[in-house]
Amino acid sequence: MATARRDRARALWRRQARLRVRDLTRYRVSLTEECNRSANRMQRVLEDANIKLAWVATNALGASGRGMIQAIIDGEQNPGLLADMAKGPIRSVNATRRWPGGSALIIGFC
């Protein structure tokens, strides 16, 4: 009798644990989707303002992208200085992506 009750309690606990894990997984997925929507929305706003951040940084929310966006918010408009804010491997790519005339229009206001 006690064993049957204990087995039912264990089964109930396992079911509740599975439901909690399922709920947490769904919540994690919804948070990830919201994060992606926010990043896409920000990228779209930048593109609408003719700020071509995607030419330089594939991840606009990475360290380089965030620094460049903050500089733009602070009023920086010099594309050369913005391009020089790149960090890591992006920096070497930017050196080769200069437009004719020596102007760094990679991140610029078209």
Image (cartoon, grey):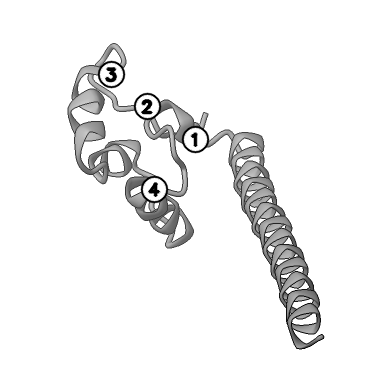
For the residue marked with disc 4, what is the amino acid? Gly
Q: Nearer the viewer, mark 2 or mark 4?
A: 4
Inter-mark Cα distance, 1 to 3 = 16 Å
Q: Residue 86: image x %, image y %?
A: 26, 41
Q: Residue 46: image x %, image y %?
A: 59, 41
- Mark carried by residue 109: 1
Local SS, label 1 = loop
Asked if residue 17 is positioned above or below residue 5 in the image, the reply reads: above
For the residue marked with disc 3, what is the amino acid? Arg
- The residue shown at (43%, 32%) is 58
Give the class, few, some or many, for how many residues have Cα within 10 Å of label 3's Cα (few <14, many ≥20). Answer: some
Asked if residue 13 is positioned above or below residue 42 in the image, the reply reads: below
Q: Which residue is mark 4?
A: 62
N-terminal label among 3 and 2: 3
Quadrant in which the N terminus appears: bottom right
- Mark carried by residue 97: 3
For residue 102, side relative to residue 71 (left or right): left
Q: Which residue is mark 2?
A: 105
N-terminal label among 4 and 3: 4
Local SS, label 2 = loop
